[in-house]
Amino acid sequence: MLGSIIFSIISWGLKAVSPHFIYQNNVYITPTTSLEYGGAGHALIGSLLVVGLATLIAVPLGLAVAVYLTETRGRFKGPVRFLAQSMSGLPSIVAGLFVYALFIATGTVNLAGWLGSLALALLMLPTVVRMSEEVLKLVPGDLRSAALALGAPQRRTFFQVIMPTAKAGLITAILLGVARVVGETAPLLLTTRLMSETSVNPFYGDLATLPTFIFSNLTAGFDTGRARAWAAAFLLLAVVGLIFGATRALTSQKVK
Amino acid sequence: MNLQTQNSNIAVMDADSHLEARNIHVWFKERHVLSDVSLHFPTNSVTALIGPSGCGKSTFIRTLNRMHELIPGAGLAGSIYLDNEDIYAPGVDPVSIRLRVGMVFQKPNPFPTMTIKGNVLAGLRLNNRRIRDEDSLVESCLNRASIWNEVKDRLDAPAGSLSGGQQQRLCIARSLAMSPEVLLMDEPCSALDPGSTRRIEETIRELSADMTIVIVTHNMQQAQRVSDQTAFFLAEEGQPGHVVEFGPTDNLFSSPNDPRTEDYVNGRFG
């Protein structure tokens, strides 16, 4: 079944994909314009921006929580761990709705890319926390003892001994978190919507992203629109494939 | 040196003691695991701690460099004097004690992401200390740990590429780089083959010229080979561990005062 999905996307997508598809945007293009014009360039940039910002929010926070759970003797570890596990089941539209309700419905801010990043960060966080925690727990306790016996303060022990040992696993945790959200559509529909121009500013105004591009092109209903959607899906799949490939490449280098 | 044979647990102050434990009691949560341990370690001596498994030798040795308190639920009473200053006095930074009292563990634990050279210098880097000539410090520590000739051509190789015995000697070199006054060794040879064990025992004798060494060992022949004085720990059924006998190694093994010591060193139990 997986094979047939991938095959469909590749075969249909290749019909519309061309070099210009990747970098051109969709200004002045209607769904009926021929495939020689326009592209998903704006959507690609938008996706990278939104997901990138989400990563910047979720990763430091997620790592900090994982460190709290493994390295400290805090009293709230049980509840925090439970919260992280429960959040991993959060439906993506609920995450989007939460951000929408908090910011847009109350009139605080308008639609913007960074709100989409917030929603995506909410979805990424549990993955990053849980995987990082597992990876940190795998670092043998005797390394920690060795560092402490050398008179190292706890913080430096963590950054110079534990982190480097866990690095490969932590990178995997981060990249898997990213892969989880790069195709999420629902929260972006509520917070970021879609535009046709290329915007590089995630802090103001609409932003196009690959999933919303696919959605809007498909729902418009024309053949050319649908072809564009397939092409964008192909692009999205390629991005995810690149992420997983990068994970394999980065982590296999660490093991000698 | 002024050693005194002890058959009881009454502390006797010794003017030459570099390190001294007085009336040490240890708990893990509610469980009393060590009772009234008083031992003194003269400067540049080697003391062996022997006794059956589970009698508190490793627990005791961890009180000497304040590693014991890192275990959740750990409790301690009594005093430990390093150069006549109580290391558990309020306001004493445990990190400063660990800089003066080093430790080598049972299972060799070099840092896997660092090279051989990096491991030797790890203690300095972890404490943000800079020295002018890193290379000669590395060479001198690896020499004193009796491993220089085996690794001098591959200092940039990962520490994991060494054999078990070599890794343990690397860990000794790593501790030496901090110039400790006291070196604690918790069964350093129990995971190693006889050849490596012998090399490390020779190293211990050489190192004791410059520092006080306390070594926990299950191997009684090893205790006889390397130590000047020996303490015999025992934990009877349901009782916390305590020191049964403490004195010069030769006396303790050839003519022990306590019948339990005699039974143990003659292999009748443990």
Image (cartoon, rainbow, N blue to C red):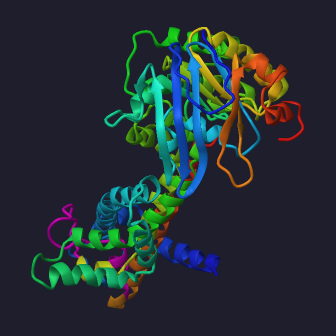
For the question of whether residue A215 can be seen, the reply is no
Q: Nearer the viewer, residue B43 or B222?
A: B43
Q: Nearer the viewer, residue A131 or B68?
A: B68
Q: Please check the rendered image and state whether residue A214 is part of the magenta-colored stretch, yes or no.
A: yes
Q: Residue at x 37, y 26 (%)?
A: B128
Residue B102 lies, with reference to residue A252, above or below; the image says above
Residue A95 falls in image quadrant? bottom left
Q: Nearer the viewer, residue B204 or B136?
A: B204
Quarter of the C terminus of chain B within the rendering: top right
Q: Residue at x 24, y 76 (%)?
A: A192
Q: Residue at x 51, y 53 (%)?
A: A136
For the question of whether residue B22 can be seen, the reply is yes
The picture places residue A234, in percent across and down from the top left corner, at: 47, 71
Q: Please check the rendered image and state whether residue A230 is part of the magenta-colored stretch, yes or no.
A: no
Which range of residues does the magenta coloring cover?
A195-218
**Image-based side of B99 in relation to B26, left or right:** left
**SS assignment for the magenta stretch, majority:** loop
Residue A169 lies, with reference to residue A115, above or below; the image says above
**Image-based side of A178 in relation to B230, left or right:** left
Residue A62 falls in image quadrant? bottom left
The picture places residue A65, in percent across and down from the top left corner, at: 38, 60
Q: Residue at x 56, y 28 (%)?
A: B11
